[in-house]
Image (cartoon, rainbow, N blue to C red):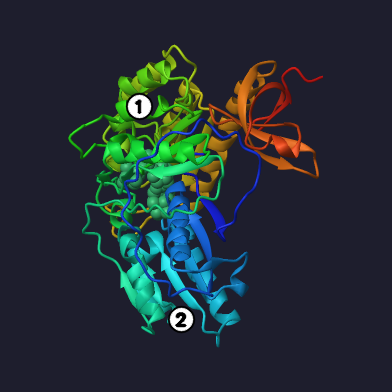
Amino acid sequence: MGNQLVQISTPGKTQTSESLTPAATAAPQFFPTPASGTGGAGKTFYIETFGCQMNVHDSEKVAGVLMARGYRPVENHEDADLVFYNTCSIREKAAQKVFSRLGAFKKQYHSSRKIIGVLGCVAQQEGERFFERAPHVNLVCGSASYSRLSDLLAQIEAGKRRVTGLSLDTDECFETEVTRRDNPFRAYLTIIEGCDKDCAYCVVPMTRGPERSRPSDKILGECLRLVDEGYREIQFLGQNVNSYRDPSPARRSFAELLARTAEIAGISRVRFITSHPRDFGPDIVEAIETHPALCDHVHLPVQSGSSRVLSRMLRGYTREEYLEKIHCIRNAKRDISVSTDVIVGFCGETREDFEQTLSLLEDVEYDQVFSFKYSPRPKTAAGGWADSVPEDEKAARLAELQERQRVIQARRNQALIGREFEVLVEGFQPRLGQAIGRTTSNRAINFPGEPDWVGLLMMVRVTAAGPNSLVGMRAGAT
Ligand code: SAH
Ligand code: SF4
Ligand code: F3S
């Protein structure tokens, strides 16, 4: 999991499966009426999504807005009247993908009347320049302007050729009651948008705007509604989810919000991602200890094991301070799984700095590490510094780090053989007759199963383990 990048096409599909419907709870309505207009009636759409879970969830919201305007999802862009690319600019490669996709698109549809929109982080970063680089684009809109999306669509439907939503001047999070969630069991829920941390290498503060949290009562009300709709698991999202600051008079801390959510009758699992080390305190660990519905997994990106590099990255903590947080997590009364993100080859990273990152991996023994080569980004502080580690050295460090982590993970996973875990069955592969379940600690286990187990919670015993996967057997089965 983590903020690993994904690429998903989101045609607004409905997955059908058996799920246990939890006890119904009265669900207060907190949302404004969706923007009116049915200018999309009879038209079709297709969304392709790149980037982190926040982008994935944004696409679910955008799909909902489109459907509220009358558009219908289709399975591929060929059949769509409107195609949206929801983009990511975290690394150069991710950003480039958008332009190559748009280029290929233009060749294929040079004379068509399709509406093309670019959303997300590259849209925000490139802004109106998109119209020069890709003249066939009709709409460019960053995530901080999605509350205007319905209006922008109305303008396009009325015949306007180019529209933009690019203001970052907002204190609101975009939420809508019409969100079209793809997963029938796990509901993503944004609780905080944007980022104020300004790490030296990162575009996010510029692409997603200032940090802004949603009122806790609204979040809790929405959780009640989601449980009522049959979701078993709620996943709170934020670039730094634990930097949450309740703007309502209740002034609930992030840990209190977690605890209150976990107490809602019918919620089986509550996850949250991503936690920033600087704002991670013992109260979060205490909440996990006390509330079984809070998942025993923390994604705590470290970025580097060298305090010198961390200081240049402007991360706001040292190696020692980070390790204190890990110590607190490891001392919890419940086993808590920890994963992280690492950047290798940041400006000025020496071999010795890198070795400190390797030694940190040994010290912490993460269950999962998402590792990236440093990619200089425009308009960031580090974007103007010398990108001093050569590309082949970055690649060599990345490979070395990943091999080191592979050994650690193989060892940790081997130690799980024979243990039993509760899994939420998330999928079934008919060809293999295998169900895929996820533990509360976010480990995936493959085990022989039935298609109608999808959506159920069941106990599974681990029977074999590799560095990246676990194999099991339904507990009690022979
Ligand atoms: N808010 C989270 C991270 C969000 S971005 C945090 O601060 O922990 C997801 C991950 O992308 C980061 O953790 C980092 O490892 C990686 N990343 C961000 N900018 C990058 C860059 N310029 N080059 C390479 N990796 C980068
Ligand atoms: Fe980027 Fe740093 Fe904000 Fe994370 S905390 S999103 S790495 S600026
Ligand atoms: Fe997410 Fe990529 Fe934007 S990681 S916040 S979609 S830059």
> Count the marks: how many?
2
The answer to whether residue 345 is visible is no
Q: Which image quarter: residue 326? A: top left
Query: Circle 2 sits in a helix, a strand or a loop, which is it?
Result: loop
Q: What residue sits 49% from the left and 17% below the top?
A: 335
Q: CA distance from mark 1 to mark 2?
A: 48 Å
> The disc labelled 1 sits on which kind of residue?
Arg
Name of the residue lying farthest toward the bottom: 111
Relative depth, front residue between 303 and 50? 50
Lateral position of residue 396 relative to residue 289, left or right: right
Lateral position of residue 218 relative to residue 453, left or right: left
Query: Circle 1 sits in a helix, a strand or a loop, which is it?
Result: helix
Q: What residue sits 47% from the left and 38% below the top?
A: 228
Relative depth, front residue between 131 and 395? 131
Q: Earlier in the sequence, mark 1 or mark 2?
A: 2
Residue wearing tag 2: 136
Return the mark for residue 458: none
Q: Position of residue 87 (x, y in %)?
A: 45, 61
Relative depth, front residue between 239 and 352? 239
Q: Position of residue 392 (x, y in %)?
A: 52, 51
| Mark 1 vs mark 2: in front | 1
- For the residues labelled 1 and 2, say whether their Cβ atoms are less than 8 Å apart: no
Q: Position of residue 42 (x, y in %)?
A: 54, 75
Q: Is mark 2 within 8 Å of ligand 3?
A: no
Q: Is mark 1 within 8 Å of ligand 1?
A: no
Q: Tell me if mark 1 has few (under 14), some (14-19) or many (20+) residues whose alpha carbon lies within 10 angstroms of its own.
A: some
Q: Position of residue 433 (x, y in %)?
A: 79, 38
Q: Tell me if mark 2 has few (under 14), some (14-19) or many (20+) residues whose alpha carbon lies within 10 angstroms of its own.
A: many
Depicted 55 relative to depicted 445: above or below: below
Return the mark for residue 260: 1
* Quadrant of image for the C terminus: top right
Q: What residue sits 41% from the left and 78% below the top?
A: 138
